[in-house]
C-alpha cells in the first residue's frame, strides 16, 4: 500500500537531486502508480510558465533567475498545501543544494509545511551526464555545470536524509525505494 501520513492523511514528498538524476521521471511514475490520490508538482514545469522574459538557467544565475526560482517555489508550495488540504498527496521535485539550507529545504518547509518529507536521488556522475545528454531545451545543461551541481549534491550524504543512488535502478524500483524511505520517515521523522 502507498505510504500515508498519520490517520491516512495525505503526505508531501520533496524529491531532490542534480540535473539528470531522474527526479521528474521518477516523480511522475510515483504519482501515477499510487493507490491514493497523488499530484506531481515539478518546479521546472512551473518555472517554464514564464514565457517572455524567462531566465534561462543556461545563461547563468542572476537576480532575475533567482526571483523566478523563488516565485516558482512559492507557487509550488501553495499548490502542495492546497492539494494536502484536500486530501491529495503530492511529490515535488527540485535541485535543492545542501549548502543553501535557508533557500533550499528551509524555503520548501516554509512553503509546504513541517510534514514535508525530503528524499535525495543521487546517481553517479556518469549516469547524470548520460541522462543530461538526451535532454533538450532549457533542461539540457552544459556537462561542466552538471558536474558542478552533482559535486555540490554530495553534501547530502551524512545529512540524515535518505539518499538513493538510482544509477542502476529502473524507474519502478526507484519509486519503491522512495516508498520505503517515506515509510521510514513517517515512523521516525528526520531532523532537518
Image: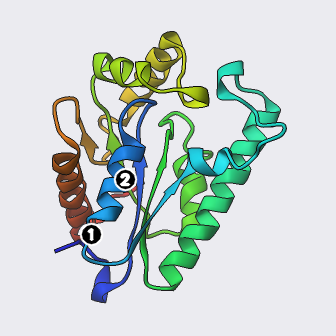
Left or right side of 27 for 86: right
Quarter location, residue 40 = bottom left
On residue 27, the disc is 2
Name the image quarter holding the C terminus. Answer: bottom left
What's the residue at 30%, 78% (across, down)? 36
* Residue sitting at the far bottom: 7
On residue 53, the disc is none
What's the residue at 48%, 24% (across, down)? 149
Left or right side of 57 for 82: left
Crowd around label 1: few <14 · some 14–19 · many ≥20 (10 Å): some
- SS at circle 2: helix
Name the image quarter holding the N terminus. Answer: bottom left
Q: From this view, report whether residue 154 is shown above or below residue 120.
A: above
Crowd around label 2: few <14 · some 14–19 · many ≥20 (10 Å): many
- SS at circle 1: loop
Q: Where in the figure is residue 13, as x and y percent of width and height?
A: 39, 60
Closer to the camera in the image, 15 or 189: 15
* Mark 2 / mark 1, whichever is N-terminal: 2
Left or right side of 110 for 33: left
On residue 34, the disc is 1
Q: Where in the figure is residue 126, as x and y percent of width and height?
A: 30, 16
Amino acid at each position: 500500500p502507498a505510504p500515508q501520513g498519520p490517520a491516512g492523511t495525505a503526505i508531501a514528498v520533496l524529491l531532490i537531486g542534480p540535473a539528470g538524476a531522474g527526479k521528474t521521471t521518477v516523480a511522475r511514475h510515483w504519482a501515477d502508480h499510487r493507490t491514493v490520490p497523488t499530484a506531481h508538482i515539478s518546479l521546472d514545469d512551473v518555472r517554464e510558465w514564464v514565457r517572455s522574459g524567462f531566465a534561462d538557467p543556461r545563461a547563468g544565475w542572476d537576480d532575475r533567475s533567482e526571483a523566478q526560482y523563488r516565485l516558482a517555489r512559492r507557487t509550488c508550495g501553495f499548490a502542495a498545501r492546497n492539494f494536502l488540504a484536500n486530501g491529495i498527496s503530492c511529490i515535488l521535485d527540485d535541485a535543492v543544494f545542501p549548502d543553501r539550507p535557508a533557500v533550499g529545504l528551509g524555503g520548501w518547509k516554509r512553503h509546504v509545511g513541517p510534514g514535508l518529507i525530503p528524499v535525495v536521488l543521487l546517481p553517479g556522475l556518469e549516469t547524470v551526464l548520460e541522462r543530461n545528454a538526451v535532454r533538450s531545451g532549457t533542461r539540457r545543461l552544459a556537462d561542466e555545470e552538471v558536474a558542478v551541481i552533482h559535486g555540490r549534491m554530495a553534501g547530502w550524504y551524512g545529512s540524515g536524509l535518505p539518499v538513493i543512488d538510482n544509477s542502476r535502478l529502473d524507474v519502478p524500483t526507484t519509486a519503491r525505494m522512495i516508498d520505503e524511505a517515506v515509510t521510514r520517515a513517517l515512523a521516525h521523522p528526520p531532523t532537518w
